Image (spheres, rainbow, N blue to C red):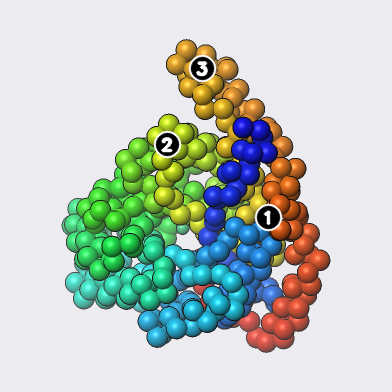
């Protein structure tokens, strides 16, 4: 297959989901810098996501956050069909909120108070129902649960409470729905986090039921951790459900995918392409962006993210798997490593531009966005009103 054919084949199947919260005003616990063009209504979030999809062609779904986007729960679900029809993007993963209410001060599924655990369970059941109503497959769970000081939480008991609540959540799934279990080593808890790494997420997903999978947020690892190895193991176990993409230099910072270490993202994609090559089966993985840009323009940054993801995915598709297998078998180390480096070093941008033109998309989505006047229009329309901060995501 020619380089162009490989790139075309890879990009034709690569889709990436945008987060609704990536278009809203967000910040850190130190401060929020408001942007006049930030989206503050669900209409505006769908509109902005629709812009990114119209220009890139690969973002047909938008992840929704129940508390921020569906304040009336199931009652808000009717809005989604209207917005999808209007802006050309569908609802993607449904994200319950188990960390913002005062009740969750000491945890949600891991809370020592059974009434709070029940409230958290009910919220997840509502979220599963919302997912069903809006036609979403994945309910994506991230927990802030943990503790700040040794001895203050019963780690094993909380583990059991998590398993029980995840099982209860799983029982509510329709046959085509999935439960994604995300992990994070620390923050907001600074001593112990109930689901701190992929092993804990894997065990809990297994305990939850057959439709539960692990979600890998690339920013949720210790600095030197080999993320692609985790990906390879989850693939081998049939337990890789999806990704939240972002990058980070120190801790979970919501930096733009590939902005710090593009080779890391390439290596992750390589493991996925290698798995598909070796098994002949395309793994069913939800690729999602989980970034909110506090300083960059939100739509610009999202287009940048999608383009970087496409480039790195296309590069991974250039790896010569047959030659790599031979080199690995012979322990021909430099040749094997060079096969990855050759693919990573290949400039795939011309092929991607051609792919976009062949698909009737702008060759340069970023420039097309700048030329479109959309940002100027929403800045005018949205900038006049008092802006609010909707989330910390
Ligand atoms: Mn995440």
Write the residue at 43% across / 80% down: 77
Residue 189 lies, with reference to residue 37, above or below; the image says above
Q: Earlier in the sequence, mark 3 or mark 1?
A: 3
Closest to the observer, 21 or 276: 276
Using the image, tell me which numbered label, if any, was put on residue 280.
2
- Separation of marks 3 and 1 at Cα, in angstroms: 36 Å
Q: Position of residue 354 (x, y in %)?
A: 73, 47
Using the image, tell me which numbered label, if any, was put on residue 10.
none
Residue 261 lies, with reference to residue 212, above or below; the image says above
Please tell me in which quadrant of the rendered image residue 66 appears.
bottom left
Q: Earlier in the sequence, mark 2 or mark 1?
A: 2
Tell me the crowding category of disc 2: few under 14, some 14 to 19, or many 20 or more residues within 10 angstroms, Cα based: few
Write the residue at 52% across / 82% down: 82
- Separation of marks 2 and 1 at Cα, in angstroms: 26 Å
Disc 2 or disc 3, which is closer to the eye?
2
Write the residue at 52% across / 14% down: 332
Please give the residue where the numbered disc 3 appears in the rendered image: 327
Tell me the crowding category of disc 1: few under 14, some 14 to 19, or many 20 or more residues within 10 angstroms, Cα based: few
Write the residue at 77% across / 62% down: 368
Q: Label 2 CB, ligand 1: below 8 Å?
A: no
Please give the residue where the numbered disc 1 appears in the rendered image: 359
């Amino acid at each position: 297959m020619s380089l162009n054919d490989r790139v075309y084949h890879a990009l034709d199947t690569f889709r990436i989901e945008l987060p609704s919260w990536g278009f809203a005003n967000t910040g850190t616990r130190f401060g929020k810098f408001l942007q006049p063009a930030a989206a503050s209504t669900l209409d505006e979030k769908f509109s902005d996501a629709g812009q990114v999809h119209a220009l890139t062609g690969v973002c047909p779904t938008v992840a929704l956050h129940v508390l921020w986007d569906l304040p009336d729960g199931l009652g808000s679900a009717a809005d989604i069909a209207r917005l999808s029809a209007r802006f050309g993007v569908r609802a993607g993963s449904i994200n319950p909120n188990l960390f913002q209410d005062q009740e969750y001060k000491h945890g949600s599924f891991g809370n020592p108070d059974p009434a709070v655990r029940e409230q958290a369970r009910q919220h997840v059941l509502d979220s599963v129902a919302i997912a069903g109503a809006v036609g979403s497959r994945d309910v994506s769970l991230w927990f802030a649960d943990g503790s700040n000081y040794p001895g203050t939480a019963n780690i094993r008991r909380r583990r059991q409470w998590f398993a029980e609540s995840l099982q209860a959540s799983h029982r509510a799934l329709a046959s085509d729905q999935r439960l994604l279990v995300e992990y994070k080593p620390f923050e907001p808890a600074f001593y112990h986090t109930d689901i701190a790494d992929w092993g804990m997420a894997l065990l809990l997903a297994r305990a939850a039921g057959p439709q539960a999978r692990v979600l890998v947020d690339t920013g949720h690892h210790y600095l030197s951790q080999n993320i692609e190895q985790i990906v390879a193991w989850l693939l081998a176990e049939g337990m890789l459900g999806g990704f939240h993409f972002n990058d980070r230099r120190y801790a979970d910072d919501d930096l733009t995918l590939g902005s710090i270490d593009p080779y890391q993202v390439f290596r992750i994609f390589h493991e996925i392409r290698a798995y598909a090559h070796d098994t002949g089966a395309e793994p069913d993985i939800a690729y999602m962006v989980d970034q909110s840009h506090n300083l960059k323009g939100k739509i610009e940054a999202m287009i940048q993210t999608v383009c970087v993801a496409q480039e790195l995915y296309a590069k991974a598709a250039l790896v010569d798997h047959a030659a790599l297998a031979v080199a690995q078998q012979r322990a021909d180390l430099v040749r094997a490593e060079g096969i990855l480096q050759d693919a990573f070093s290949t400039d795939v941008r011309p092929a991607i531009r051609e792919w976009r033109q062949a698909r009737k998309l702008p060759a340069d989505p970023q420039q097309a966005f700048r030329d479109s006047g959309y940002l100027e229009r929403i800045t005018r329309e949205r900038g006049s009103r008092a802006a609010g901060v909707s989330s910390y995501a």
